[in-house]
Image: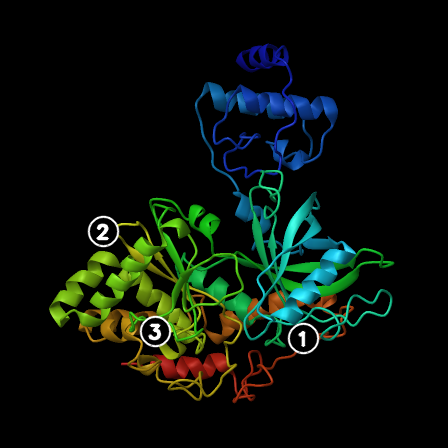
Amino acid sequence: MKRTFGFLFVACLAVSSAVNVRAAVVLRGDTNADNDVNVADVNVVLNHILTEAQYADLYDINGDGEVNVADVNIILDLIMNERREWVRTAEDYVWDETATTLPELHLSVPLDEWNALLSLYDANPQTTQYVMANCRYVGVDGVETAINDIGLRLKGNTSRRRPEGSKGETHRAGRTDWHHAHFGINLRKFVKDEEHTIRGVRKLHLKWAKDDPSYVREMFCYDLFRRAGVWTGSRDVYCRLWLHVEGDPKEVYYGVYEMIEPIDENWLKRRDTEDTFGTHKGNLWKCRYSTHPATLNNTDGDYWYDDDSDDKHSYTLQTNTKRFDNAKAQLIDFQLKLNGKARDSFYKWINEVCDVDLLLRTYAINVAVGMWDDYWNNGNNFYLYFTTEDLYDYKVYFIPYDYDNTLGTSLNCGVQNDSGRQDPLRWGGDASPLIRRLLEFDDFHALYVKYLKQAVDDAADLMHYNDATARITRWQQMIAPYVANDTGEDTEIKDEPASWGNHGEYRLLERRNNYFTTKSNVLNGAQ
């Protein structure tokens, strides 16, 4: 009787207007995504029943494939009994790593905007400027989300490419010379409202398999971080990408891409829990080899903030940019202490400002996958997050980033010439002090060696040959039917490292010259 009365009562209320159905749904029954379950959520479901609106999956609370009174009754029960059941978040929907099908992205670009993108690349191949486009996202559940007036730009460092033709050429409809390229999507670049999200997700990083004929290297690494308990790793799934330029007879199929979770303020918000950062309002720095390597050993380094320009810096502040001077002072103070503190003082300080266990766990995985283009060896490809803006009172976290040149893709760089066989205790040189100084202490050294060996332990489901090859085979079988594409590039899966590497013999699936078995021997021998 309680449920029936509740339904009749709420049915008499005015039906609410359409809500933002693309917002994140994180509570069971929270259909309007306000982080509460109340009468407003009942009205949303009633509105759907009466109007047969889209996004039924958000309102099908009991999962029976229909939206009806039964779903309303569940919400009423949740309200009356004050029960709260957390369910899939927005990122779980977009980055659904359990899915056996691939989401789709269809980009539509006005002709003048596409030609502007080509001109921006010609003026500066490292351009970070956006053009306007439209997007249609098809989730793994088949639900479509259409968003107009989004931001589209090119991404990548040495891998950045012109997506069509040669320098100076404009779009050639019907006789187009397409090229694979990395893209960045900012759904709220030009229109900043919640309608310009995919259920709360604002940005996507689309990456093609430039340096990876196997199509699995970066996917494997980000998955491995999460399996190893490194929650600072981004999420990564496959998708299929189409592109249509206004006036073309049909859209071009760009093939299988990685859809990677960008590291930004919203990335921080998704990790703002008691078990992770506990805050999202601190200072986030992108660190890379630019004018100088980002080794954290030189306080005269190249510091700046993300000013929406094409300039690149070794240390670029991503958040709190209006208080750049304060953030820079904090980072410099951290470097001075990192390099200048005496042994005992350093040990006490680093335990206070850093989750050393997480850092060593992170770096053990970094070394296990053979990431040579990293902080320790090359002063490149990482983020630092300081949890507060206070000059001294903070926790600092190392965030791994950019893992396509791994798993046997090797190069003569820094102290290395073979990323599979390199001594894991001498992964980089003395110029990068963070890991080197940690390993001078017996307890930190033992912890690092423990995580190295755990990575290849056959009982850990991480990087042992049997576990690794099973995951890779499953991913490749899932994407194989969709790899052939209209660019004519990267149209088949091959068990090889990048062609420009110095150890082309490494394989991921074959037993001969296998990267995983080679690495297991090296890591198990670490002392």
- Determine whether label 2 and label 3 are within 8 Å by CB: no
Residue type at mark 1 is Ile
Number of numbered markers: 3
Quarter of the figure that contains the N terminus:
top right
Q: Quadrant of residue 48?
A: top right
Q: Residue 186 versus residue 411: which sits nearer the camera?
A: 186
Whichever of labels 3 and 1 marks the residue nearer the N terminus, that label is: 3
Q: Nearer the viewer, residue 38 or 175?
A: 175
Q: Amino acid at mark 3?
A: Thr
Residue at 33 percent of width and 59 percent of height: 397
Q: Does residue 91 sit above or below 487 in this rendering? A: above
Residue at the image position 74 percent from the left and 28 percent from the top: 52
Residue 53 image-quadrant placement = top right
* Camera sees residue 68: no
Q: Is residue 28 visible?
A: yes
The image shows residue 299 at horizontal and vertical percentages of: 29, 69
Give the residue at mark 2.
Answer: 393
Residue 14 on image: x %, y %: 63, 14
At 52% from the left edge and 60% from the top edge, which residue is drawn?
309
Q: Earlier in the sequence, mark 2 or mark 3?
A: 3
Picture coordinates of residue 60, whole percent (x, y): 63, 32
User: Left or right: where does residue 7 sit relative to residue 246?
Assistant: left
Helix, strand or loop under label 3: loop
Where, quadrant-wise, is the C terminus in this rendering? Answer: bottom left
Task: Please tell me the numbered disc located at residue 493.
Answer: 1
- Between tags 3 and 1, which lies in front? 3
CB of mark 3 within 8 Å of CB of mark 1?
Answer: no
In the image, taking residue 448 as reference, residue 404 lies left or right, namely right
Q: Label 3, label 1: how many angstroms apart (C-alpha)?
A: 36 Å
